[in-house]
Amino acid sequence: MSASSPKEIVLADPHPVFRLGLRYLLQEWFPGAVIRETGDMQDLLLQIQQQAPDLIISELHLPPGDLLEGLEQSIHLQRRTIIVYSHYREPKLVRQSFKLGISGYLHKSSPALHLKEAILHVLRKEVFMGEGIVLSEGQRGEVPEVHPAFRDYFHLRFELTRREIEVLAQIKKGLNNREIADLLYISEQTVSVHRKNILRKVGVNNTQKLLHITYEHHLA
């Protein structure tokens, strides 16, 4: 098994026949991987407390709850790498899923090989959005006219604007507010506002902590 292959996978879906078909595919793609199954949210939470799977593939709806509720309530689940493979693709649910920490999202109408592609992406700590998955109403396919960094898990989770991403990139280079303002043709006061918004969204109170997070995620 290569370093990019999952060693332990949990399939979370309320439909046993779907899980069975997906298990066969995963066993073909990743021979030797341990594959566990569950059909409900409570059992999923129990499994991840007892084990440490390096990948979870899950439907959103997991009676008697759902994956988003689980992510909000369980720090154990938040620490796992998760691909949502769902019948649901409403942009609101997609945005909420990424904000809560998932790494990939596909609709169940996607070709099977797209799931394999998604798995390889998320194991490299990259975000994957399947065909037809969008973040807002009116969009089709990939998000148009958005800085490539938006495809990164970090930016999706913290919902930075394109301008905030541009400012963050210059902060990482060590530029001060005046230098950033000159480079981006905006006022120094505007840069200061963007910097404060970035700190607030990321949840840190100084630039040093912000830079630590960006380096940790290989961002900007």
Image (spheres, rainbow, N blue to C red):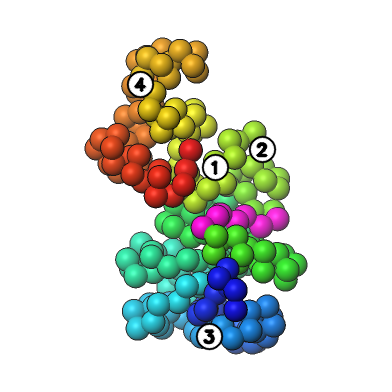
Of callouts 4 and 1, the N-terminal one = 1
Residue with the mark numbered 1: 150
Label 3 SS? strand
Front tag of 3 and 2? 3
Label 1 SS? helix
The residue range painted magenta reads 125-131
Of callouts 3 and 2, the N-terminal one = 3
- 141 or 138: nearer the viewer: 141
Q: The residue under label 4 is which amino acid type?
A: Asn
x and y percent of residue 38 in the render? 49, 84
x and y percent of residue 207 in the render? 30, 34
Front tag of 3 and 4? 4
**Can you tell which mark lies on residue 144?**
2
Q: Reply yes or no: does residue 130 show up in magenta.
A: yes
Tell me the CA gap for discs 3 and 4.
Answer: 50 Å
Residue at 59 percent across and 40 percent down: it is 148
Residue at 63 percent across and 79 percent down: it is 30
- Dot 4 and dot 2 residues touching (CB under 8 Å): no
The local crowd at label 2, few if under 14, some if 14 to 19, many if 20 or more residues have their Cα within 10 Å, is: few
Residue with the mark numbered 4: 176
Q: Reply yes or no: does residue 193 show up in magenta.
A: no
Image quarter of residue 124:
bottom right
Residue at 60 percent across and 79 percent down: it is 1
**Can you tell which mark lies on residue 34?**
3
Label 4 SS? loop
- 191 or 95: nearer the viewer: 191
Of callouts 3 and 4, the N-terminal one = 3
Label 2 SS? loop
Q: The residue under label 3 is which amino acid type?
A: Val
Tell me the CA gap for discs 4 and 2.
Answer: 30 Å
- Dot 3 and dot 2 residues touching (CB under 8 Å): no
